[in-house]
Amino acid sequence: MTLEIRDLRLTAIVGADIRIERLATGFDFTEGPIWNETGQFLIFSDMPGDHMRRWSETGGIATFRKPCNMANGNCWDRQGRMLTCEHATSRVTRTAADGGITVIASHYQGRELNSPNDIVVHADGGIYFTDPTFGRMEYYGVKRAPQLDFRGVYRVEADGSGLRLLVADFDQPNGLCFSRDGRRLFVNDTMRGHIRVFAIGADGGLAGGEVWAEVKGDGQGLPDGLKIDRDDNVYCCGPGGLHVFDANGHSLGVIHTPEIVANFNWGGPGYRSIFLTASTSLYRIPTLTPSPDAA
């Protein structure tokens, strides 16, 4: 069973017949997929392999960057530059069009960040990222003791200035995404198994933080990658595969995946394919509802 339907509205969002296509395999642990619309290719990370790769329909798999400081989450900023969370260095970096790399964040109040994990950019250019300790564990990063005694969510300005700790009461914050109107930020907590929602203030700060949805189901996997589609449905990696929620946090169902899925993103023509970074492989599934980036 590929599609676990908890609410019949799910079939209108992703289709009734889900076909999961494996595009490539043989990796260590895949993460951080982002679609490059201009070049029509996908970039994704392989943390344990210390290797960032690209995939395209015509070129297949190629190396994008190796070594990559055990990169995890990636996104584009408002100028089309790539932002990357690095597990091995506890940094957030920005890659310019010429390949030059600038450090955006690395320390908070003189102490190293834990291991920046996932990252998004607001319409105002502000950069938000989560900072759990997964990158200080063996295999997924470099084993070392944390310098901070909390796992937080941060914002840094578009130019890399003004790093601010916004929330510090998570167990392990992970995936995050904005509501379509940019007024709310959703953040999941991997170990607590839920998604929280925050109101975004005029200064970019966060308020609230109540539990918005529980990510429950059968199978392996925990809350990880988190994104929203063009119709305000929220998707979250979790037990058994990719969970889909409506705009009110009601669980519509689960797209079951062959391997534990850590992250995903839309891409391809019209942004109507979902690319899944799932353990040792990269998968693709068609969908009826595209990314907010679709024209």
Image (cartoon, rainbow, N blue to C red):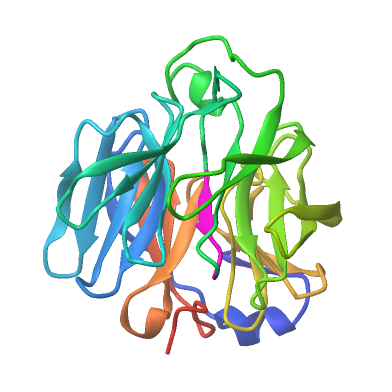
Position in image of residue 15 (x %, y %): 56, 83
Q: Quadrant of the C terminus?
A: bottom left
Q: Is 273 above or below relative to 196?
A: below
With 116 as the anchor, is 154 left or right in this view? Answer: right
Using the image, determine if residue 2 lies above or below residue 233: above
Using the rendered image of the protein, determine whether residue 20 is visible from the camera's viewpoint.
no
On the rendered image, what quadrant is the N terminus found in?
bottom right
Q: Is residue 97 visible?
A: yes
Identified at 83% across, 54% down, the residue is 207
Quarter residue 235 falls in: bottom right
Residue 288: percent from left, percent from top: 51, 85
Residue furthest top as drawn: 145
Read off the magenta span: 118-123
Which residue is depicted at the point 12% across and 69% down? 58
Residue drawn at x 45%, y 63% as measured from the top left: 265
**Is 39 situated above or below 90?**
below
Image label count = 0
Residue at figure coordinates x 47%, y 12% from the top left? 143
Q: Quadrant of residue 22?
A: bottom left
Residue 141 is situated, as x and y percent measured from the top left of the image, at: 43, 23
Judging depth in this view, the residue of 87 and 147 nearest the camera is 147
Question: Where, by quadrant of the figure, is residue 33 drawn?
Answer: bottom left
Q: Nearer the viewer, residue 83 or 221?
A: 83
Q: Residue furthest left?
A: 59
User: Image check: 235 left or right of 270?
Assistant: right
83 relative position to 100: left or right: right
Q: Position of residue 60 (x, y in %)?
A: 16, 59
On whether residue 45 falls in the magenta region, the answer is no
Q: Is residue 255 positioned above or below 160 on the image?
A: below
